[in-house]
Image (cartoon, rainbow, N blue to C red):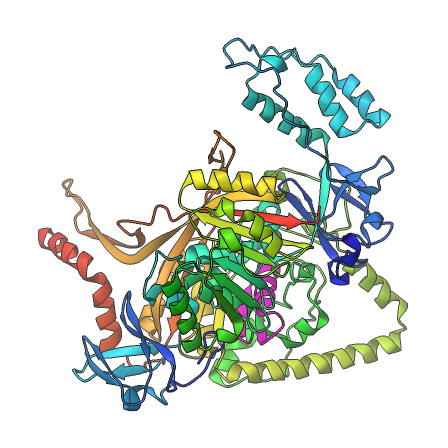
Amino acid sequence: MSFVEYGDTIKDGDTAIVFLGHESMFPVKVQHGSKTQTKYGVIRHSTDLIGKRYGSKVTCSKGGWVFILHPTPELWTMNLPHRTQILYSTDISLITMMLELKPGSIVCESGTGSGSLSHAIIRTVAPTGHLYTVEFHQQRAEKAKEEFQEHKVEHLVTVKNQDVCKNGFGVSNVADAVFLDIPSPWEAIGHAKSALKIEGGRICSFSPCIEQVQRTCLAMEEHGFTEMNTLEILLRVYNVRTISLQIPDLGKAQGTAQFKSGVPLKEMVGHTGYLTFATKSLF
Amino acid sequence: MEESVKPGLRIREGDCVVLKRDEVFKAVLVLRRRKVIFEKQWFYLDNAIGRVYGTTFEVSSGGNLQPKEKMEETTTETKEAGTDNRNIVDDGKSQKLTHDDIKALKDKGIKGQEIVQQLIENSTTFRGKTEFAQDKYIKKKKKKYEAVITIVKPSTRILSTMYYAREPGKINHLRYDTLAQMLTLGNIRAGNKMIVMETCAGLVLGAIMERMGGYGSVIQMYPGGGPVRAATSCFGFPESFFNTLYEFPLSKVDSLVSGTFSSETLPSEPEYNVPVEEESNGSLDEKQTLTQETEEESSTEAVMESNETEEQETMDLVAEDTEYKETKEKGNKENIREKQRKQQERRRKLVETAALLEQKNADGLIVASRFHPTPLLLSLLEFVAPSRPFVVYCQYKEPLLECYTKLREKGGVINLKLSETWLRNYQVLPDRSHPKLTMSGGGGYLLSGITVTAEKVQSNASSLEAQKIEEPTSKKRKLQELHC
């Protein structure tokens, strides 16, 4: 397996996703001799995982079952260990498209955080692109490096432990796209501009607060970015239910009426952050 | 600085480019001496050839494009301004220049910037407006009189935004952020073997191909005579991308699944890359037909939806013109031989594609069409390997409710999720930041999931899972039933 390529069977050293049921899953590092505890019993890696096809059902020692899934950046985002607040697939999807990422793209990102977006970017720019990711927190930078190695994508990413606002991304005029998710993005706009290719590229800044967005937009304008656009995207999930409503007794008819409905969840995410996109062009 | 730009970033003759003016986009083919209409202006694209993508132009009086130099913004000197609008009366008489005066200025060839300046000087109320109101006024006038057109390189971002704004009916009202979700949820990337079924003019196909970068393969399932790829040709992919693009008729899917497939009967003559007569989208006012280029341009969405010349309006493609001339010129005998050869080739490709499908190891399935999604999913999922994502788009929620139910019954899928995204645009200006006034009402719905090894019998497992999800509500239902 690989985070950038599908494999058919589970191998020693793989990161697999154990699926227990609705919204219940966790990642597991597949290793000969290892055992993983689940609420349905034990999974013995050597006999239950290695050599089995991804997507197979595995029965655990207590009799319950789970599915073993091939990892994808989206499954990773839902299951990764949080070191910081992360970006979820809804925002990641929009960022990927609006930054025009594709195989071969060179991307600069800061901060790396927990690596949620990083994994998604790496998947999109593979096999010929590259991600330069900057994280000012030493342990987080190291953990990210470790994970990229474990996930066999280290050849597609370079992690730098520095402050992007002071020292930039460490590269000049190579990026097709820059992404900023830091407390003071306006301080990094100049560095972002120099990291981007001379002929131009796209930039995105993610900020939870509107004040940050205002400062960032001003900075972008001052540095000559064009096509500025701020938006937010929210996900609305529906549960599919068969609903039975009672027919009121008005004297005649009685009984129940049944219908299928897409029922919204009781709560939904109301805000993650504002996404500001802009273009650097020669003109 | 411009000279050092790589050739791939320069506009070439034959390229499909996108014209941009503020938030309005239009895709056109760059052909010499070919008049193009965009935002009420007529011009030739000849002067764009050789220029770098992203160049901004002005339309000169001769209908030619003139590159515009980046203007120095008028420095913000402390201008005279008022504090609020309590004394500003809108009697329609505050602008002293008449319609004819302005026309005269335009005819004299006065630059837009100068016209805006004239309008400001001849407005009696300008000085009394607040700074913000003055800003807004200037922006509005600039938008009207300083018509600049930027030529940009097509991409999923640009084309999906363009189609959603201009011809949403052609793409089943798939909003661009919904498309973005599909590409990510479907884990579309280089090296995949994708199955795609779309009736979005080839936009979804193009987006998928862009994310795959020419690596891997795509099998496009199509209804009727052939796939529509009008939007796909807009992306400007290199020829090599199309070497791993296959197509397969939906009408043969049943036979493939049941094992009775034969290549003997091909569907009626397909016409690839030519704007085909598209079947109605299901809504009553959208019957599109092949027509010649027309002079008219309609800018409002309502008019566009019912406009029969849609295909030509957005595309300005001349593919069908040249193909028509070509077939006329060839002699009859050569014609027949050519047709036979083409048919052989098509048959060969069909068998090859069938073999690819029969391997049942596709890395994902994307469906975005005007058809009811349930039958499509139930049959096409047969060709997808286990532990792979699939995403279905539908303009309406209800068919996806049914799809969800049928998939649960069938088994072999997990992590089913029905969702939609809300998108909101913001105006960000100092002391004037707020969401924009209008918002898209709906961008369609998505049903996504992951395949797993199929279960032959409706086992404990799937009903167990169903129970896990439905626990909270089933308690409520029990109470209701008691009352009956």
Residue positioned 67% across, 58% down in the render: B277
Q: Position of residue B132 (x, y in %)?
A: 55, 23
Q: Position of residue A70 (x, y in %)?
A: 39, 77
- Residue furthest to the left in view is B482
The answer to whether residue B281 of the structure is visible from this angle is: no
Residue positioned 70% across, 71% down in the render: B269
| Front position in the image: B280 or B107 | B107
The answer to whether residue A210 of the structure is visible from this angle is: yes
Q: Position of residue A248 (x, y in %)?
A: 17, 43
Magenta run includes residue A138:
no
Span colored in magenta:
B191-218
As drawn, B218 above or below B155: below
Magenta run includes residue B195:
yes
Q: Is residue B227 left or right of residue B69?
A: left
As drawn, A93 above or below B461: above
| Front position in the image: B331 or A97 | A97
Picture quadrant where residue B147 is located: top right
Picture quadrant where residue B68 is located: top right
